[in-house]
Image: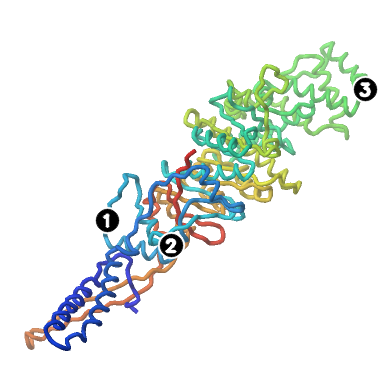
């Protein structure tokens, strides 16, 4: 059985055998020239010498072995469009990683051979050369991408360049494209705008960036909802919490946001972050009165006649006092509602809740929303207020207003830069609230059953914005046409964001495809190799023994030598090699069980 073992990298023992045969050939030639009939060994020596010499050359790596993978390759957009397939995403060049390649990788590492690189780039190009220098174009079916994709890669490994290849194809396919980019990579933004023009979709490109308000569109993340609880959830999800978002402070803030949102709807106004801040921070007394009046006009058109006694009573200072309201007309309106409508079928649960909120002890109220006010402030301060809470009635602001629903229905290409390097906290909040709005729209699409076409969503540095709504997009977005590609540097980043490893693994587990470029983090490497699975490799074991019994006779010496071949379980892709992948090289697990070793080009204009 040991004869079946042929390590990928080893000394060319055949060379020594070939030398003997060739020497024998030389002797045979000399014998043929000197002695008649000495030619009977010429053909055997020539045949066996040639065969073993060929095997020796293979063993020395001159034929078929030791070939390095290519490092940097450049491809222009025209070349990309030529290799694009209608039902697949082109993703560079490579090959299917098989157990054979695992065996070769182990053999190579055991050989101790060090290859000199022609380039100073990091990584080991020999990993890609394990297929004997053969590679083909990699095409990932779009059907597989419907299961969502997670991409790992350390800084500089090539995540952004990989996104350029994915996004460019999505734009030319005619997809709705959403890119959430916390860093705000200018090259990626320019690439998206340029490809929109090249695809004849120049009007489809939209740009949102808090650091460039004059160039940015205005984006209303509160416009789409089916229940006011969705609005409250989007902001409450941003609150710092020690118990997964279920502590008393978060619950109180959620209730306050929900009641104010209901009050705004009663008055016929669409809730915005600015309006929520105004009534949460300054008090909801005026909103309560407006909501009562609007509701009464609908259910009791002549209510002011029946409320006249209450107004007279209040004008004489005899109305029930309230800590935060002194206006007599307001007091009269509230007292009339409490007496006539509150406990009747014509009452309004939202107004009842808003009334209890206004009557709540102000000092205690301020303590309970202490963490909510900073969140509302940072989302409405400065230019950001006009960007996220657009005023449609402001004639002086000509910047277009969009929301996630109109972006999807219009098949737009949206680039959202979050400027995380300048302000990580605000950028994280913006990303989370925008993703929450997309989750709401995904739910609407799913419930209606009318898909608007493929929606390609890309989220870079996803650990900075991942939240419960984003998890819902991963869970249910497929039914609404969403295809998500999320990228992060390590699994620990997502764990730190969500505060729990099981929740982080739930997010990652919703992605059926895994692409990893070079990664250094050990825990992330373990997670990746677990996803790739294991295989069996051949291991050669050699045994030597010797002994002597000099008591009887000094020549009583014995010795033995043996070898055996065994099979050992091993990671399909060796874990530590994940830290040795060159830039733009990747290993991927695609839905359906395919494991691919590939490399990507740098996309040029």
Q: Nearer the viewer, residue 278 or 186?
A: 186
Quarter holding the N terminus? bottom left
List the residue tagged with mark 1.
Answer: 114
Q: CA distance from mark 2 to mark 1?
A: 22 Å
> Mark 1: few, some, or many residues within 10 Å (few <14, many ≥20)?
few
Here the colouring is rainbow
Q: Which quadrant holds residue 356?
A: top right
Image position of 25 (left or right of 521): left
Residue that numbered label 2 is attached to: 572
Residue annotated with mark 3: 302
- Which type of secondary structure does the marked residue at label 1 adopt? loop
Residue 18, percent from left and from top: 22, 74
Front residue of this view, candidates 552 and 578: 578
State the residue at coordinates (58%, 20%). Answer: 382
Looking at the picture, how far across and down is residue 232, in whole percent? Answer: 67, 34
* Front: mark 2 or 1: 1
Q: Earlier in the sequence, mark 3 or mark 2?
A: 3
Near-viewer residue (391 or 56): 56
């Amino acid at each position: 059985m040991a004869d079946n073992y042929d390590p990928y990298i080893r000394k060319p023992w055949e060379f020594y055998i070939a030398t003997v045969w060739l020497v024998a050939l030389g002797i045979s030639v000399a014998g043929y020239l000197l002695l008649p009939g000495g030619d009977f060994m010429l053909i055997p020596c020539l045949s066996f010498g040639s065969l073993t010499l060929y095997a020796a050359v293979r063993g020395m790596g001159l034929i078929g072995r030791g070939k390095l993978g290519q490092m940097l390759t450049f491809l222009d957009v025209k070349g990309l469009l030529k290799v694009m397939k209608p039902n697949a995403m082109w993703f560079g060049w490579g090959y299917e990683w098989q157990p054979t390649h695992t065996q070769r990788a182990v053999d190579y590492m055991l050989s101790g051979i060090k290859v000199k690189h022609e380039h100073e780039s990091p990584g080991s190009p020999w990993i890609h050369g394990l297929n004997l220098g053969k590679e083909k174009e990699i095409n990932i079916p779009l059907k597989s991408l419907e299961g969502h994709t997670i991409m790992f890669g350390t800084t500089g490994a090539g995540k952004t360049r990989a996104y350029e290849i994915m996004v460019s194809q999505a734009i030319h396919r005619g997809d709705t494209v959403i890119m959430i980019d916390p860093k705000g990579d200018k090259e990626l933004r320019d690439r998206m705008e340029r490809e929109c023009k090249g695809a004849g979709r120049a009007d489809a490109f939209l740009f949102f960036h808090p650091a460039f308000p004059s160039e940015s569109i205005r984006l209303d993340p509160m416009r789409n909802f089916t229940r006011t609880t969705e609005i409250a959830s989007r902001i409450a999800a941003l609150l710092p919490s020690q118990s997964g978002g279920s502590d008393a402070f978060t619950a109180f803030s959620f209730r306050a946001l929900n009641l104010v949102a209901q009050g705004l709807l009663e008055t016929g106004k669409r809730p915005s972050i600015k309006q929520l801040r105004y009534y949460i921070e300054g008090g909801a007394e005026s909103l309560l009165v407006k909501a009562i009046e609007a509701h009464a006009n609908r259910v009791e058109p002549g209510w002011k006649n029946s409320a006249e006694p209450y107004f007279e009573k209040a004008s004489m200072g005899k109305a029930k006092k309230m800590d935060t309201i002194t206006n007599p007309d307001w007091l009269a309106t509230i007292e009339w509602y409490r007496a006539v409508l509150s406990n009747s079928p014509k009452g309004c649960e939202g107004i009842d809740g808003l009334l209890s909120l206004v009557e709540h002890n102000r000092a205690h109220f301020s303590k309970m929303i202490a963490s909510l006010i900073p969140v509302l402030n940072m989302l409405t301060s400065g230019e950001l207020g006009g960007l996220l809470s657009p005023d449609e009635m402001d004639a002086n602001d000509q910047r277009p207003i969009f929301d996630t629903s109109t972006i999807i229905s219009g098949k737009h290409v949206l680039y959202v830069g979050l400027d995380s390097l300048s302000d990580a906290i605000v950028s994280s909040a913006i990303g989370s609230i925008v993703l929450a709005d997309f989750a709401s729209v995904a739910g609407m699409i799913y419930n209606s059953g009318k898909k608007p076409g493929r929606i390609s969503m890309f989220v870079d540095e996803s650990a900075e914005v991942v939240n419960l709504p984003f998890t819902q997009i991963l869970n249910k977005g497929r039914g609404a046409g969403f295809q998500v590609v999320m990228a992060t540097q390590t699994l620990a980043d997502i764990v730190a964001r969500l505060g729990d490893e099981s929740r982080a693994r739930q997010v990652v587990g919703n992605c059926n495809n895994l692409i990893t470029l070079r990664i250094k983090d050990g825990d992330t490497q373990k997670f990746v190799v677990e996803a790739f699975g294991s295989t069996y490799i051949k291991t050669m074991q050699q045994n030597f023994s010797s002994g002597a019994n000099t008591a009887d006779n000094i020549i009583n010496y014995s010795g033995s030598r043996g070898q055996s071949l065994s099979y050992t379980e091993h990671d399909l892709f060796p874990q530590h090699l994940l830290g040795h992948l060159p830039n733009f090289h990747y290993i991927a697990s695609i839905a359906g069980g395919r494991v691919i070793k590939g490399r990507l080009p740098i996309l040029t204009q």
